[in-house]
Amino acid sequence: AGSWTRSNWEDLGTAHTKAYNSHALHWGRRRVSFRSLRRWLITLSVFASVMVYLRWYPEAEMPGEGFATSSWPRPRALLGWRHSETSDGRWLSDNDGLEPSFTTDPNGLRFPPEVYPALMNPYQRANATFVLCQRARPQRNDVEYADSRRPEKPFSPDFTLAIKSMTRSQVFFGLIPSRQRTYPSHIDRRRATRAQKAMGSSKKTSHSDDQSHRHISHFHSGHFFRHPLLLNFNYYWRVEPGIQYDCDMDYDPFLFMEENKKVYSFAVSLKEHQSAIPTLWETVQKFARANPDLLPANSSIDFILKDPSQGIESDYNLCHFWSNFELADMRFWRSSAYAKFFAYLDRAGGIYHEGWDEGAIHSIAAVLFLRREQIHQWDDIGYFHSPFSHCPFDYERFHSNGKCFCDPYENFDEDPNSCAPLWSELDRKRNEGLETQAA
């Protein structure tokens, strides 16, 4: 009874039908209200039962899940989370500093134990931080590391308080020094301005005519790792506004880097615009010829060469690691080899007179000075930063279990401008070489 439930409302035209249906509507609403009340009572009962369980259930450990053995936190620990709130609004878990147990995969890489939300993470952590240079929304921080933000202008008190309230980790705020937000003394400003305008008019490279972007590239290439906020850290994870991580991170990537002695890592690799770096490679070649003692025999230089048989004399194939996702050891950037390399490139002026950026500079330095096994590709991290993405392709490992929510068929790795296939091929050859030596 009650035509208010039907889609045809024409029978409500007479006074009689209006009164009838008004009565039906009234009782229908009462039925909905009673149903909602029952739902609320059931929800309240379930919540009360859970709280009683957490308060009185014996403190017993439950077995962990996943390929690494771990233990869940005791139920009483859940009630202690609120008590760990700090004076500046952060929620911190007690870190027991337990020694993590690592598992080894078929390729010989050692993985830390699975990490549930950071409030439950009892394991010791690497000396690491997340780094941002923009006013960005806070990133997900499941393994609870510090967060360092360094804009060009001071953050407002309201902003800093809002950021601190959104993360359980310590957050440090600082400024990029003014001397690193202007042209170095050896740069011809007029020449730099003309070059930037010319590149901007071509529309072939992004940010090419953006003066502030040139300063930021210069800062990222040669100075950020010596900023006072970062001097006490070893590892960093660079994050950017608008990024999206499409897979659950169930282990600590910083501990992975530390345990496996990785120095540089990436998720996306692609080809640079030749118009942005017309003289970069010849400048690198001059440096390499003058400093052959800095180049290890088992480097990854083949990754950036058109003809690997020619070595450093080969042309540059334009491949580089995308620095918008960069997880690395700052001790490498602070090394004498990199300091000497950056000083040479900086003196050449290509960051301002052309369009050299930290992506190409960091990439070339990594493949020149690091051993092949010191560089790692994060195949298991889903990552999107417009317009590029990386999505793990293994369905059983990443998608059937709901670990990733990206589309592997939209993976930039399959794009003609991607350098991922080349890196994978070099990685395969390296692994085959190790197996041959072991045999």
Image: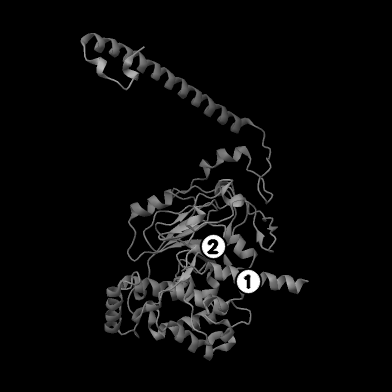
Q: Could you say whether the residue bearing mark 1 is in a helix, strand or loop?
A: helix
Q: Is residue 82 above or below residue 307?
A: above
In front here: 355 or 327? 355
Q: Residue 128 carries which label?
A: 2
x 35%, y 86%: residue: 186
Q: Mark 2 packing: few (<14 Cα in 10 Å), some, or many (20+)?
A: many
Q: Which mark is residue 214?
A: none
Is residue 433 left or right of 212 when viewed as pictured? right
x 68%, y 51%: residue: 68
Quarter of the figure with the C terminus: bottom right
In front here: 392 or 189? 392
What's the amino acid at mark 1?
Glu
Q: Could you say whether the residue bearing mark 2 is in a helix, strand or loop?
A: strand
Q: Where is residue 387 in the image (x, y as percent from the top left)?
A: 41, 61
Q: From this viewpoint, which residue is outermost toward the bottom? A: 290
Distance (Cα) linking label 1 and label 2: 21 Å
Numbered disc total: 2
Is residue 102 left or right of 265 when viewed as pictured? right
Q: Is residue 267 above or below residue 54?
A: below
Q: Where is residue 307 in the image (x, y as percent from the top left)?
A: 55, 82
Q: Position of residue 259 (x, y in %)?
A: 65, 64
Q: Where is residue 235 in the image (x, y as percent from the top left)?
A: 54, 65
- Residue 264 seen in this snapshot: no
Quarter of the figure with the N terminus: top left
Q: Quadrant of residue 32?
A: top left
Q: Name the residue under label 1.
A: 373
Of circles 1 and 2, the one toward us is 1
What's the amino acid at mark 2?
Ala
In front here: 109 or 328? 109
x 32%, y 56%: residue: 156
